[in-house]
Amino acid sequence: MAATQRPDLTQASAAELAAGMAAGEVSAREVVDAHLERIAVVDGVDARGPVWSAKTAGRLDADEPHAFLAVTAEAARDHADDIDRRRAAGERLGPLAGVPLALKDVLTMRGAPTTCGSRMLEGWIPPYDATVTRKLREADLVVLGKTNMDEFAMGSSTENSAFGDTRNPWDLDRVPGGSSGGSAAAVAGMLAPLAIGTDTGGSIRQPAALTGLVGAKPTYGTVSRYGLVAFASSLDQAGPFARTVGDAAALQSAIQAHDPRDSTSVSDVVPDLGLQLQDGIAGLRIGVVRELQGEGFEPGVEAVFQASLERLTALGAEIVEVSLPTAPVGLAAYYLIAPSEASSNLARFDGVRYGLRVDAPTAEEMNAATRAAGFGAEVKRRIMIGTHALSSGYYDAYYLQASKIRTLIADDFRAAFAQVDVLVSPTSPTVAFDLGEKTDDPLAMYLNDVATVPASLAGIPALSLPAGLAEAPGAPGSALPVGLQIMAPLLRDDLMYRVAWAFEQATGFDPRPSGPRAIHLDVEVAR
Amino acid sequence: MDLSTDEVRHVARLARLALTDDEVAELAPQLSSILGYAEQVGDLAADDVEPTTHPFALTDVMRPDEARPSLTAAQVLAGAPAVEQDRFAVPRIVAEEG
């Protein structure tokens, strides 16, 4: 394999790559090879065989982001060759044909391992494609591999993976956020122009904010959950990571569709996300959520947020302060509802049908021993919270009350959207924090999700995009990405993207990581 | 609320998790702190508020009851830890008489 990297290809947007391939300036194979080469050089994988595996946790280098758990190199090259052949034969291809992307390891893909970042599923090869995976293939997007994640998507830092931490390409000693940290690191580190993540309480938006990316949680039910290994079924939603708003909108358009295989898939027609993307926001009313700022938010994050409001005003939008009175209790409700659903969903990991089994004399002992060995600490913690919250005598006080809070939050959003077109807040109260900084205090880690869970509980679409850089507390001179969250009414993902596009044009954020501990963008390594 | 180690063991039994004594000792204060934080949901939700379990009020739809292609038994069993006679094999479930 050539040892020279192609930054012209790995730093290009999906739209630029697609245009280049459509014009015949570059082949899908060249684009895929350029990304595989960069992954082989910088990510810490054993680049041999049809499926490359990531190095084991103990052998990873502190300069390696460890975005990928498995790289499906041979399948990606074959798919690219097939696209090039069909293009040469004059076949009409989709708008993103030949663009490579990374897939979070919680979505199944036939013939490749799906681990969900857990020992429980180590070595499991699913016999079917998730609907998202099938839609990607139908759109001729080329899957490069499966990305690291917090075990079963439970976490906000990707430090709960059984296969080692993922590192933030902006500062390799900091977390990329989570749980979709591998997908975020892949796109921020220029290992892929696009990635799919999943968001239950912020698991796309928060890592997007911490790595300087655009990341969107679509309206609940617009992207099929078939083949998405369930964490909290009433909240889980797959969505895009990209370095531009246009790329994110294009990827979300490619994966959203009604699916009879998902009983909560909405059958309403979702507006075309590209149609009014560039219409601007003059005259729109934008609500600032009073409860999602102030205490608990870092000064640097608040300063970037205030500057963002001025930018939106300059674009012709009217800024209005609105209240979501129940939002502060959203986090408490979320940390009852999500673990409750998880405790039910993860009951399927019983050592019988797939994954790990630890032998024991009786079925119940086998179940308990298997689950004790297969699940990590955070997954056990959430199963315990959920089991307790659903258990006899506690259900009314915990799960039922939390479900009522969910109603109040949805009512709050309805009232707010009667006054304004979209809502904004900081995505995360902090910039990327140090690896290991919050692993000893589960509740402190949960507080990262305070601004993202309200939209999750209401099911509304929400997106994070880069708003600027801020200094991390205790790290003078540091400059780390800050995200702006945009929330829109149910099924108004188009409006959310329109605001994001206008903001992006006015911001001019450079997505290339910079700083003393940033990932190298121009390494040429002879191997 | 504070969870005792006995209560943690009871929940672990319900959840089919064979926790070690160290894990039980670590989880008791952690779960107490998380549940203590979560208890604030009780302060706001009045009796007359309807619970929400899903963002959309979806109603069940029926489809024709017809045979469609599916995975083969071999494909489904390929990922199982133990298989006998084309079935999932499990240890004894019902206690022996005696």
Image (cartoon, helix red, strand yellow):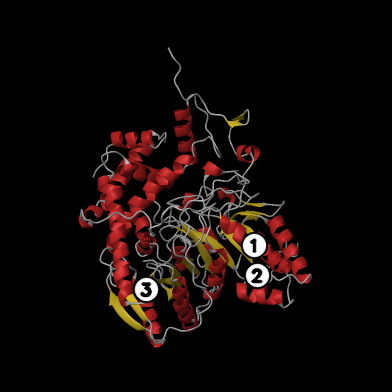
Residue at disc 3, secondary structure: strand
Residue at screen point 38% across, 82% down: A284
* Residue that numbered label 3 is attached to: A424
Task: Identify the residue shown where x is 75% and y is 67%.
Answer: A86
Q: Kindly indicate whether the residue at mark 1 contacts the one at mark 2 (C-beta within 8 angstroms).
A: yes
Q: Which of the labelled discs sits on residue A125, or is there none?
A: none
Viewer-closest of A414 and A443: A414
Q: Residue A183, located in which quarter of the rendered image? A: bottom right
Label 2 packing within 10 angstroms: few (<14), some (14-19), many (20+): few
Q: Residue furthest front?
A: B64
Image location of residue A527, percent across then percent down:
72, 60
Q: Which residue is mark 2?
A: A94
Residue under label 1, please give it. Answer: A138
Chain of the residue on which disc 1 is drawn: A
Which residue is nearer to you in this view: A393 or B24? A393
Is label 2 on the same chain as label 1?
A: yes
Q: CA distance from mark 2 to mark 1?
A: 8 Å
What's the distance in space between the residues labelled 3 and 2, CA to CA?
A: 33 Å
Can the viewer see residue A174?
A: no
